[in-house]
Image: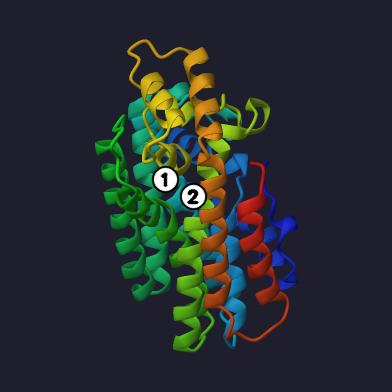
Amino acid sequence: MLIDTERWLTHQPSAALMGALDGVLEDLLRCREERLTEAAAHLVRRGGKRMRPALLFVSSAFGPGGAETDLLRVAAAVELLHVAALYHDDVMDRAETRRGTPTVNAVRGDAEAVTAGTFVFARAMRTLAAVDGTLAAWASRSVLALALGQMQEAENTYNLEHRLESYAEIAARKTAALFELSCRAGARLAGAPQDAVEGLGLYGRALGLAFQAADDTLDVTAPEAVLGKKPGTDLREGVYGLPVLLVLHRRTLEAERLRQVLRRDDFTEDDQEEACHHVQAGGGIAGAFTIAQDYAHQAVTHIAGLPGGEAKDSLARLARYVVTRRH
């Protein structure tokens, strides 16, 4: 299981809550239909980075305190919103692996994967509504943003003229929205003052954008043994991340070479490797890394006014980690 909060989470109360999260996730996904339970829990049992629940727990440290049961249930629900979106993404992308294991759609078929994803969404929203109606309303807006981002990404598949402004909108909707929700939800549950809720929400949004920019570089540079897929897989599928777009928007020889490779009808694995080379040689990786660092810096500035301590230190460490991580 890939859970790497130990690399940045120094706030011990949050770390303790993370240890109780798996049981809550399993409880929320349990239903009378055993087959549906198994399909819904398939990806959850593979772990993941679990940044969203961890963010919620840490953000709750900036208020007088919230009920531990509520914190765990809402953190689990936010994680399930993320997991449900991954199930639907995998169907749309025809993905065969996720987190080093076969996807639900690969093992059980598209219909069962979509059904499981919808079930997970429903369980998450029901949980949020039972705890706090305001949180459910916030979550519904985040899910809408996520859906719009997915549609926008699909519309720009294989688009060599995809605008950087559009890319930023997609990243804000597909990734940053749930990061922001996690931070705001934790602060609200703990009764944090409104300025802290706002600052943490802005931190989460900037952190999500940094995370996505860094994630796009990993698609081009990370070895197959690390990500479980060959470098440039998203690129080959027509999903052009930030490093690719940065090169394509330049009037350079590497940009033209990259365009020529991406226009090939019979796009082979050799072409995929060549395209990754042009992205790196054209400065796409370096440029995306700089942008990720800028977003991470913005994130930290948004929490500058919060009280010091392990919680604030953890958030600062996370901002550095999302940029420098290798998976």
Query: Is residue 304 shown above or below 205?
Result: below
Give SS at disc 2. helix
Q: Can you give x and y, in whole percent of width and height, for residue 187 in the image?
A: 51, 78
Give SS at disc 1. helix
The quadrant holding residue 65 is bottom right
Q: Can you give x and y, in whole percent of width and height, for residue 132 in the image?
A: 40, 74
Residue type at tag 1? Ala
Residue type at tag 2? Gln
Query: Is residue 17 shown above or below 193?
Result: above
Residue 32 visible? The answer is: no
Q: Which of 146 and 236 is in front in this view?
A: 236
The quadrant holding residue 153 is top left
The quadrant holding residue 194 is bottom left
Query: Is residue 271 shown above or below 132?
Result: above
Find residue 212 and name its label.
2
Q: Nearer the viewer, residue 292 or 135?
A: 292
* Label located before the other in sequence (2 or 1): 1
Q: Can you give x and y, in whole percent of width and height, for residue 78 in the image?
A: 47, 59
Closer to the camera: disc 2 or disc 1? 2
Q: Residue at x 55, y 44 (%)?
A: 44
Q: Residue at x 37, y 45 (%)?
A: 119
Provide the residue designation for mark 1: 84
- The count of marks equals 2
Query: Is residue 2 shown above or below 108?
Result: below
Q: Which residue is drawn at 70% across and 73% down?
A: 313
Q: Can you give x and y, in whole percent of width and height, for residue 233 in the image?
A: 49, 27
